[in-house]
Amino acid sequence: MGLSSGFAICVVLLALAGPAAGQEIRPTLDKIKETGIVQLGYRATSRPFSFLGSDGQPAGFSIDLCLQVAGAIRESLKLPGLKVAWVAVTPADRIVQLVKGTIDLECGSTTITFGRMEQVAFSHMISVDGGSLLATADSGISTVKDLAGKRVGVIPHTTTEKALAGTSFQGTVIPVAEHGEGLRGLEEGRLDAYASDRILLAGLLATARNPAKLRLSGESFSYEPYGLMMRRGDNAFQAQVNRTLSRLYRSGLVQIYERWFGPFATASPLVKALYLLHSWPD
């Protein structure tokens, strides 16, 4: 997953200090050229898109895409010593960290919405998913209709929370801060179900202490198009990111995709169409 040997990568697990309040953020490519550093935001438990691996390094599909972007920036700006600073972000602070300049690009599992576009910009779509449920096997939960009287973990202010509220949901919402907390709530008996995007829930199930005690619902109750998140109004940087993704979608994506999702041949027609439609020409 690494870039060329001359491309140093430093991992920053604590958020870097952002610019002072009111200070203008420079165009991202100018900032990167002056500092020799591109600051990338990652999520700790959004497997298989963005998470901390067993070696303590950020890993996942979105992480690999962002490394491709960093490599393209290294070449276009002629910065052989470009460093990557990884900065941990959460659903609660990812937009704030981006807007204030602590990170340049968020490499996570963020859904593209018009509401978020009022604050930030997005790359091409990188994946598509849908809201679903991971429940304890003993709960008898298979769909949203089974949630009456049940305790359901949800990350506040997410598209999952909004979509679940628009269903026939009649359970009790238990706020959680991150996906890892949702899994622990299931394993420790504090939750009957955890609601999030289905691919992320499958990633949590794969890391559970006893997967046999959990059940992943086959139902999807929302549409979740993912993109890499960046600052608004920075057209040059957005073009750099999207050019990199389009080139990758035309050639080179399959190896990265299969590393995290299995054979590309078995991907849904919707996923294959996503990459075809975003393979824009130079």
Image (cartoon, rainbow, N blue to C red):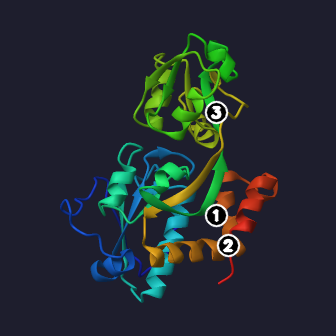
* Numbered tag placed on residue 252 in the rendering: 2
Query: For residue 223, which quarter of the picture?
Result: top right
Sequence-wise first label, 3 or 2:
3
Mark pair 3, 2: CA separation: 30 Å
Where's residue 88, x and y in %?
Answer: 36, 52
Mark pair 1, 2: CA separation: 7 Å
Mark 3 residue type: Ser
* Numbered tag placed on residue 256 in the rendering: 1
**Vertically, is 92 above or below 53?**
above
Residue occupying the point 66% across, 51% down: 128
- Looking at the image, do the residues carrying marks 3 and 1 touch, with CB atoms under 8 Å apart? no
Asked if residue 245 lies left or right of residue 41, the reply is right
Residue occupying the point 42% across, 44% down: 91
Q: Residue extending furthest left? A: 20
Question: How crowded is the residue under tag 1: few (<14 C-alpha within 10 Å), some, or many (20+)?
Answer: some
Question: How crowded is the residue under tag 2: few (<14 C-alpha within 10 Å), some, or many (20+)?
Answer: few
Mark 1 residue type: Ile
- Looking at the image, do the residues carrying marks 1 and 2 touch, with CB atoms under 8 Å apart? yes
Quadrant in which the N terminus appears: bottom right
Asked if residue 6 lies left or right of residue 159, the reply is left
Quadrant in which the C terminus appears: bottom right
Between 218 and 265, the one lying in front of the other is: 218
